Image (tube, grey):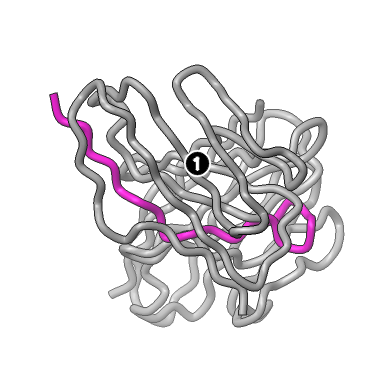
Amino acid sequence: SQKIEQNSEALNIQEGKTATLTCNYTNYSPAYLQWYRQDPGRGPVFLLLIRENEKEKRKERLKVTFDTTLKQSLFHITASQPADSATYLCALDINSGYALNFGKGTSLLVTP
Amino acid sequence: SAVISQKPSRDICQRGTSLTIQCQVDSQVTMMFWYRQQPGQSLTLIATANQGSEATYESGFVIDKFPISRPNLTFSTLTVSNMSPEDSSIYLCSGAGEPTDTQYFGPGTRLTVL
């Protein structure tokens, strides 16, 4: 069956450092992979989308890599800030459509 | 981008009753979806809401339990029927479509069934 795995343990880092979150998947050939941010009591907010033919994408302090051979995506937040503290979700398309399968998410805590 | 609102934001219901959740999008979207997020878990797709026709349900979800309507491009409802405590969850509506593949989520409806 299709599986999406993210670091189950919370990631604690110091302000100013780079946070790196991992998303691994199995039994999947996704057309694209997305990263979302979710704050407590709120719906997910879209951050970045990377397609199967792209290796890297950047947006301000965010960078995503996508390795379809390793079946892995890495999500980086550079110069992290306490405001970046949230749960980050990896999501893959279902059958190349708009519907998504989500990983369980990784909780990030950035301390001053 | 699209802004999505949901009503109610939360509710506490008795076992055996039903609750209808409304989802409104401020602009037209091609697709609308309903997800469930149980405590400590990630989002699970319940169904795709199809305009003017029956919703497409994912494995493990059935129309009798989760009837869905989408009368137009910007509005959808999800009903949780004959509720039990196991239905306690956050229910999220989302919209997606051209020109991007991204999804926009509503704030969610937190349902507690006693």
Mark 1: which secondary structure?
strand
Q: Which residue is mark 1?
A: A36
A19 is higher (above) or lower (below) than B1: below
Q: Which residues are magenta?
A: A93-112
Q: Amino acid at mark 1?
A: Tyr
The residue under the point 60% across, 64% down is B45
Locate the C terminus of chain B and report the quarter of the image it occupies: bottom left
Residue A59 appears at what percent x and percent y?
55, 22
Q: Nearer the viewer, residue B109 or A67?
A: A67
Residue at the spot 67% in from the left edge and 29% down from the top edge: B26
User: Residue A45, percent across and down?
Assistant: 50, 36
Chain where mark 1 sits: A
Name the quadrant of the N terminus of chain B: top right
Residue A107 appears at what percent x and percent y?
30, 48
Among all residues in the image, which is located at the extreme left?
A112
Which residue lies at the image location 57% right of the left edge and 25% below the top edge? Answer: A58
